[in-house]
Image: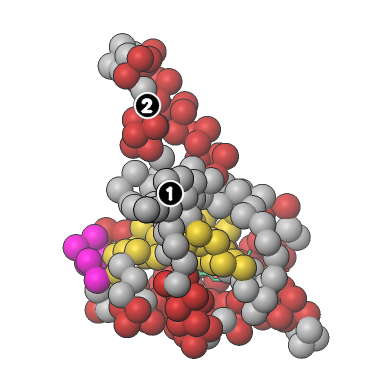
């Protein structure tokens, strides 16, 4: 399961509040949705928190989001640990504030033995950037003579992706009525189903989540084949 959490800004603006107010409400929703996953039998959840394109937002919004991520990790670490959640981050950490990057590493280590829910947070993540970084590493292996070009297939490339230890998503949900994938899990979503819902992320409560999962359960997935 993967979610593009969209609509925080519009949610705040419609209330006459700054955009960051919407992101704060969005962060509370993350906790609600994470807590609902075990009831719904969801073992893997990947959420899009910050894209490689989001740096183009105002400095105030970007630094507000970075502070929010730091506070969220600090505040929620124990709850995630107790709740059996294993947290991983995908995306390029190089450009992130070292303090935030350290908190991310620590949370990954702290929760590494958990198995109830695998929560992956995409932070400074872009699908093209991920494939580019993976290709660079793969090319270095070829150049060093450790990998033969003719041995490179889809599964080889997948091993170099940030998501190498995760299953591909069955379903990608995007909130807020936009029907785009915005550079999210490009490689991994090759056979994913999509659900675009009008609800803005801060309003996307566990009931909305259950409803979307219910709709997905009725779909017939063929993976390119024809059922008899
Ligand atoms: C998109 O809404 C949302 C984001 C770019 C940030 C997502 C972040 C959160 C939900 C906050 C916390 C996350 C974690 C993991 C603690 P938008 O700002 O593009 O909304 P708009 O399209 O209405 O402007």
How far across and down, in percent of the image, does residue 122 sit? Answer: 49, 56
Residue 103 visible in rendering = no
Q: Indicate which disc, 1 or 2, sits on the residue closer to the N terminus.
A: 2
> Residue 194: horizontal and vertical position, in percent?
55, 61
Other residues around mark 2 within 10 Å, as few (<14) / some (14–19) / many (≥20):
few
The kind of secondary structure element at disc 2 is loop
Residue 226 bears which disc, if any? 1
The answer to whether 189 is drawn above or below residue 81 in the figure is: above
Image position, residue 169 (x, y; %): 42, 57
Does the rendering let one see residue 189? yes
**Is residue 208 on the magenta stretch?**
no
As measured in the structure, the alpha-carbon distance from the residue carrying label 1 to the one carrying label 2 is: 25 Å
Give the main secondary structure, helix, strand or loop, of the magenta stretch: loop
Q: Residue furthest left?
A: 113
Q: Please report the residue visible at 47 percent of the width from the left and 26 percent of the height from the top.
A: 136
Q: Pick the residue in front: 194 or 184.
A: 194
Whether residue 209 is situated above or below residue 143 in the rendered picture: below
Compare residues 41 and 136 and report the one nearer the observer. Answer: 41
Residue at image mark 2: 153
């Amino acid at each position: 399961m993967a979610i593009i959490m969209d609509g925080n800004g519009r949610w705040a603006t419609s209330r006459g509040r700054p955009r960051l107010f919407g992101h704060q409400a969005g962060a509370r929703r993350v906790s609600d949705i994470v807590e609902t996953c075990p009831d719904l039998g969801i073992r893997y959840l990947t959420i899009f928190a910050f894209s490689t394109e989001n740096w183009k937002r105002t400095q105030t919004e970007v630094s507000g989001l970075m502070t929010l991520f730091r506070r969220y990790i600090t505040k929620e670490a124990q709850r995630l640990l107790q709740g059996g959640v294993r947290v991983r981050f995908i995306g390029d950490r190089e450009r992130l504030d070292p303090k935030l990057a350290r908190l991310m590493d620590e949370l990954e280590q702290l929760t590494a033995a958990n198995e109830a829910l695998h929560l992956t947070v995409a932070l400074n993540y872009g699908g093209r950037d991920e494939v580019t970084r993976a290709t660079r590493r793969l090319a270095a292996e070829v150049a060093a003579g450790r990998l033969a070009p003719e041995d490179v297939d889809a599964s080889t490339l997948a091993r170099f992706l940030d998501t190498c230890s995760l299953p591909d998503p069955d379903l990608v949900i995007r909130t807020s009525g936009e029907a785009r994938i915005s550079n999210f899990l490009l490689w991994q979503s090759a056979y994913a189903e999509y659900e675009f819902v009008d609800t803005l992320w801060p309003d996307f409560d566990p009931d909305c989540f259950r409803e979307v999962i219910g709709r997905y359960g009725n779909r017939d997935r063929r993976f390119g084949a024809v059922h008899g």
